[in-house]
Image (tube, rainbow, N blue to C red):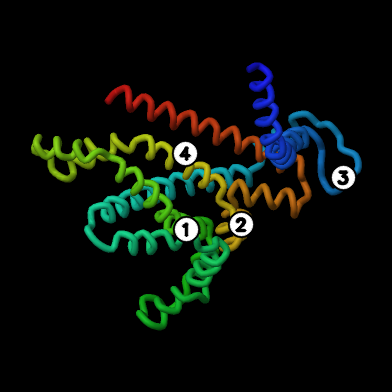
Amino acid sequence: METKSLKNRIQIFLLLLPGMIVFAMFTIYPIVKLFLMSFFKWDFSSMAEQTFIGLDNYKEVLFDETFHTAFTNTILYTIITVPAQMALGLLAAVLIHNIPKFKVSFRVLYYLPVITSWVIVSLVFKYIFNTEGMLNYVLTNVMHFTSTNIAWLDTRWGGMAVTEMLGTWKGVGWNMVVFLAALQSVPQELYEVADLDGCGRIQKFFYVTIPSIKSTVLFALIMLTIGGFNVFTSVKMITEGKPMHQTETVLTWMYYKAFTSGKFGYAAALSFIVALTLAFLAILQFKAMKNKDETM
């Protein structure tokens, strides 16, 4: 029996070995290499020989005014888009869950933006909100609301607002699918008991539906927060950080410092600061949800 058990363990190990090797090569090694890189002066001028500088890269990131702007933009993007996506996605899921017909059709319509390329929709939004774009044409030549074109993308808050609109619109479908799956798993008996107690639709939503899908809400919240901090393509395609790097996010600024300025050590340090921030936010979200469950 021991020989057979050992043989099974060896077989399991050999089956897992290729995946473990690939995971170590393309996940573990890059993370470790990036972490070590953050402690060295690593740029275009020192590619052959790097100098150990300790925490200087982290200090440079933390005292960089542009990083402060990019970090603030990322936080605001996350704060605005995450609740909006969750609220609209949950609303769409509830409506689709309660209609008797055409559920599949509405699922497809809401999910289409999710599978559409970020590059394509970013270019479409850029065309719409460009100074010479479609929206200004409609406002000036069709509806005659204004006589001059509005530079939507030439200011910090205008550019960020457009990317936030795009992020919200594109994420509603994903939330709809996640919440719809959760709603279908809620026991129908709970709603029947609520009916016997005289609860209305709004009361059933807040006292039956939401508590029953709280784990899904936490999952969506964490995933969307991570996604908010990873916003890159829409900002890169629509504003490119303009004007004067005022619409940068942490990833676009990291990309700029690494591949335009050549400061790879700075970019590596920035990536770990972002990772620690995400870990801290995830812990806070878990604790907040746990405390809410205890009070309930």
- Left or right: residue 212 compared with residue 125: left
Callout in the foreground (2, 3): 3
Q: Tell me the kind of residue under disc 1.
A: Val
Please tell me the numbered disc located at residue 3. Answer: none
Residue 14 locus on image (x, y percent): 71, 33
Callout in the foreground (1, 2): 1
> Of the residues under marks 4 and 2, which one precedes in the sequence?
4
Q: Tell me the kind of residue under disc 4.
A: Ile
Residue, disc 4: 222
> Of the residues under marks 1 and 2, which one precedes in the sequence?
1
Q: Marks 1 and 2, how far apart in space?
A: 24 Å
Can residue 115 be seen here? The reply is yes
Do the residues under discs 1 and 3 have CB atoms within 8 angstroms?
A: no
Do the residues under discs 1 and 2 have CB atoms within 8 angstroms?
A: no
Please tell me the numbered disc located at residue 241. Answer: 2
Callout in the foreground (4, 3): 4
